[in-house]
Image (cartoon, rainbow, N blue to C red):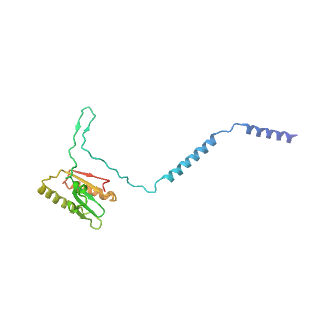
Amino acid sequence: MRLQSSLQAKISKTKKKLSKPVTLIPGLIGLVGAAACMMGLMALVMAPGSYSVVNTEFPVVPATIDDPSLHRFTERPEHFIKATTPAVVMTMDAIFLGDMDSFSNHYIDSRSKIRIAHSDRAPQVGKLLGAMKKWIATRKETRGWRNEGILVFAPASNIPAAIVIQMLDALKSDGTFEKVILAGGLI
């Protein structure tokens, strides 16, 4: 009898356990875990194989900038980029010196630019600065164009950033130009 009553007690306990409502917490935890794993896998699949620089172009327009402050100060542009503005274009093979017109309207004409080849893949900054001073003096004597104090520097996209920074520093510290504008996306 005892065996039968203990068996009956176990059966009733099992029925009670089965009749209890199922909790949703373990199911929700499993669902959230599966979703997190899927999102991680999708992020890995959708990640690009290589990262690179995205070229952008910033339009330069001679627009007045209104100051919305209390004083209502209006700033006027000091300098303008014109066709006669000097420009330096740096590629992996050489440095080219000319004005903006020689790199836009007369791009094919090699006589409108000065080419300074690299020596052992190193830019010849000293030669560039010397040629630039002679070129500016020649422009002033022959055409009457004065140095406006602005230079546009356009390195090719495959030039390392360290070389671009050194070139900018050399062009600024030379004292020939007040402002050196770094142009991108042109080559």
- Residue visible at 13% across and 55% down? 143
Position in image of residue 160 (x %, y %) = 33, 59
Which part of the image, by quadrant, shows the C terminus? Answer: bottom left
Q: Is residue 180 visible?
A: yes
- In-image side of 85 versus 11 (left or right): left
Which part of the image, by quadrant, shows the N terminus? Answer: top right
- In-image side of 52 versus 46 (left or right): left
The answer to which quarter of the image holds residue 18 is top right
In this view, 32 is above or below 157: above
In this view, 19 is above or below 124: above
Position in image of residue 91 (x %, y %) = 29, 61
Position in image of residue 147 (x %, y %) = 16, 52
Q: Residue furthest left?
A: 141
Q: Residue furthest bottom?
A: 120
Q: Is residue 126 visible?
A: no
Q: Residue furthest top?
A: 70
The number of numbered badges drawn on the structure is 0
Position in image of residue 127 (x %, y %) = 21, 63
The answer to which quarter of the image holds residue 103 is bottom left
The answer to which quarter of the image holds residue 166 is bottom left
